[in-house]
Image: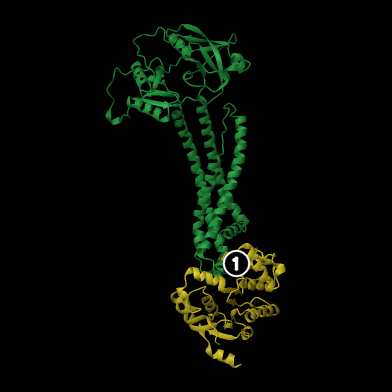
Amino acid sequence: MTSNSVLTAQGIHKSYGQGVNRFDALKGVSLDIREGESVAIVGKSGSGKSTLMHLLALLDSPDDGVLLVEGTDARQLKGKDMNRLRNEDFGFVFQQFFLTPNASVLDNVVLPLKIAGVSPKERKRRGLAALEQLELADKAKNKAINLSGGQKQRVVIARALVNNPKVIFADEPTGNLDTATGALVEDILFSLNKERGITLVIVTHDVELAARCDRQIFIKDGLEDIARENAAVAS
Amino acid sequence: MKFLDLLKSAIGNTFRSKLRTTLTVIAIFIGAFTLTITSAIGTGVSSYINTQVASIGSTDVLTVTKTADATQSTDDGPKKYDPDKATGSGGFGGAASGLTGGVLSKDDLKTIANIKGIKDVNPVVQVSPKYIQYGSNGKFVVTINATSALTKADLAAGHQLSSADKSEVLLPGSYLHNLGFANAKAAIGTTVTFGIDDYQGAEHQVDATVVGVQNKSLLASGVGLSQYLTNRLETIQSTGRPASLGQGYAIAMAHVSADSTTEQTDAIKKSLSHNGFTGQTVADQLGAFQTVISGIIGVLNAFAVIALIAAGFGIINTLLMSVQERTREIGLMKAMGMSGGKVYGLFSMEAVFIGFLGSAIGAGIGIALGSLISSVLSNTVLSGLPGLHVMQFAPASIITIILVVMAIAFLAGTLPARRAARQNPIDALRYE
């Protein structure tokens, strides 16, 4: 692959707690995510895969190691640049949705635009366009709480999309969905990757979902599981 | 996030937990309501007093008394007796001798009259007629307003006392019925009779013409007599008084030029105090009265502020709970690139909006209820004081109250807002 690196991690360490309670979530992980690819970060729960995604998404900072965003050291980023990056370049899809239950679907979707300071008219236009893309335009005025699980996850994807991000981070995007709905959500995510070139970083323990990605990074006990990666490539 | 969006979100958020917001708003409401009412009473009473001063219009009259001696320290023992110091007799009589400040002697009056800027000076003489009578309607006890000759009364009918040598009387409205007058107009021009004893106890009768009827007022109660009539009564009263008794007065009224400025009046007051006298305009005397009222209102306001501070803790509590509940939402917004400052702003605005709601409702209901009570009072209990509206609502003070409450709410919101702003997005998102 010749495309540019979007995110690069070099020897990332991260631990939680102090003393005897100290837990080393990541013990020196290095990886490189290139523009336009889809990467699965696979591991059992407690393997440190979610921590890795949070670090890559700049939601947290590593204890040790270097994180490069398009070649820039994340530590050099000022608060304002960091916020702009999170707002404009990253989109998030969470397993637990994190929708505001009593707000309308449209209001939930346009939250990143609202934070970015986009005018209400433009917000509505772009929000509806994103919902249209996910075939949810008719639900725009419904309250988020009244949607089914699959619809909720589609709203979350619409919210991640609305700012035209470069990277979408998805944490167990199908974890709370039944197989059929899960497959639908997967299709949407991969089509975004293929058609619009959005880099996809999916954290999952679902091997089938991982297999659909261009590349898999297996995490085990805070370290990259090279043996398994080789096995996966071989299969 | 733009300010308008931030504001809209803040307002929307406060209505999310209606019960909690309502309870906090009620706490603020109580404080704001009390403040509105107390400040309205302050405004109402002060403005009534000001109208009274205006109706009297005696900016040209100074009340002059002898300045009180410097407070005597108990350690110094009694002061040396000064036989030349006038003791009160005549004038305010026995009462005056009890005054610590001493009384004004004839010489003092001369000194005052010689002060630059003072046109004339008259001692206030307290005459004590035994009764007043109109026609054959019986005799009634009479109270004299000692300063009526020097001030302007608030009249219901007729005209002011003249300075001519005529025996003129101003009757208070409350005297009309007992004396046998149908109304204020009927009394004008009639002749009433005063009965007065001389120093030896012999009774004399003096006739006088009613020229006006006064409205009831806080300041001037009692029958007003023209200077000429006062002098006549005083002459009768002191007939037969032993000459050895010193003559002194508690108070004198000095006229200054009617168009003198405040500075000129101040200069006169200064030279009076230089000579050992205290000169006060009616406004000064009312000022003292107003100070007392402001003091009382200040205490009431202090209670209201205490209520507001308690309500401030209610706001802290409400918002802390709200921050706790919305941890994930805050995390999400921060993950989506909302700065800590904006999160702080969002929660601060929620606090300020709760403050605004409480104070606006409090002030609104305060105004509505206060106006109602005030108008009911002025038509019933306080009907004896025409023109007194116990509560008057000044827009400036209402706005000040609302702003102060909002400022208190902002301060109360600081702690929860800081807590929200400092949240790490990932801890917030992980929070279950």
Is residue B34 placed above or below B196 in the rendered structure?
below
In the depicted view, which residue is nearer to us: A206 or B231?
B231
Q: Is residue A121 left or right of residue B425?
A: right
Percent position (x, y) of residue B364?
Answer: 60, 44
Q: Is residue A195 or residue B30 the one in the foreground? A: A195
| Label 1 sits on residue | A113
Looking at the image, which residue is at 61% across and 40% down?
A: B369
- Residue at far bottom of view: A234
- Chain B on-screen colour: green
Chain on which label 1 sits? A
Q: Quadrant of the rendered structure where residue A201 is?
A: bottom right
Q: Pick whichever, B174 or B210, lies toward us.
A: B210
Dot 1 crowding, Cα within 10 Å, few <14, some 14–19, many 20+: many
Query: Residue at horizontal 65%, vertical 73%?
Result: A153
Q: In this figure, what is the number of numbered marks?
A: 1
User: Which quadrant holds the C terminus of chain B?
Assistant: bottom right
| Residue extending farthest right | A138
Q: Which amino acid type is marked by label 1? A: Leu
Q: Is residue A68 visible?
A: yes
Q: Residue furthest front?
A: B259
Q: Is residue B99 above or below residue A27?
A: above
Q: Position of residue A155 (x, y in %)?
A: 66, 71
Chain A drawn in what color?
yellow
Taking the image as shown, residue B134 lies to the left or right of residue B94, namely: right
The quadrant in which the N terminus of chain B is found is bottom right
Percent x, y of residue B183? 62, 17
Choose between B79 and B148: the one closer to the eye: B148
SS at mark 1? helix
